[in-house]
Each structure stands twice: as C-alpha cells, then as structure tokens.
Image (tube, helix red, strand yellow):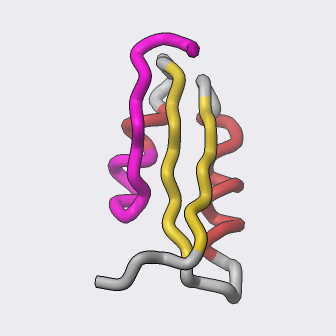
Amino acid sequence: MNTPLVTILIVTWNSMNYIYDCLQSLSRQTFKDFSIIIIDNGSSDGTVEYIRNNYPTVSILQNFRNM
C-alpha cells in the first residue's frame, strides 16, 4: 500500500449538519491521492457514528471532550 501524497485533516465538533457536504465534496475531487483524518472533539450529535457507518476509509481520532 502506498502512502497518500496528501493527508486532509478535518476538525469537527457536532458537525453533523456539514460533514456530508464536506466529505462528498472531497470524494468528487479529480485528485485522488489523499487520505482523510477526522479529529472529533467530543461530538454528541452522531457525527462520529455517521462517518464510521458511511465512510469506512476515513480515519477518526476521537477526543472525548471539546479540546
């Protein structure tokens, strides 16, 4: 497995209203040599669960409070 050329870091906190559009926009890019890491700051609105269920290739670093 090759290391991606670019790593995209997205910081979230209760971002359920925005994460779909954000990740869909990234999936439509013509440049594909990237990985995505979500850094979640204790979301309680289902953001992490949604990402895990719908974007299995996205890595999640989960803080349990808003850092």
Q: Is residue 24 above or below residue 15?
A: below
Q: Which residue is drawn at the image coordinates 68% and 36% (left, top)?
A: 17
Percent coordinates x, y for residue 10 in the rendering: 62, 45
Percent coordinates x, y for residue 23 in the rendering: 61, 59
Residue 39 or 4: which is nearer the viewer?
4
Residue 20 or 38: which is nearer the viewer?
38
Q: Quadrant of the N terminus?
A: bottom left
Q: Which residue is drawn at the image coordinates 48% and 76% (left, top)?
A: 4
Q: Is residue 32 left or right of residue 52?
A: right
Q: Which residue is drawn at the image coordinates 61% and 58% (left, top)?
A: 8
Seen as rendered, the residue at the extreme left is 1
Q: Is residue 5 left or right of residue 22?
A: left
Q: Which residue is drawn at the image coordinates 57% and 15% (left, top)?
A: 67
Q: Is residue 30 left or right of residue 52?
A: right
Q: Is residue 46 above or below residue 5?
A: above
Seen as rendered, the residue at the extreme bottom is 30
Percent coordinates x, y for residue 16 in the rendering: 60, 35
> Which stretch did the figure color magenta?
51-67
Quarter assignment of residue 27? bottom right
Q: Is residue 15 above or below residue 65?
A: below
Percent coordinates x, y for residue 20 in the rendering: 62, 52
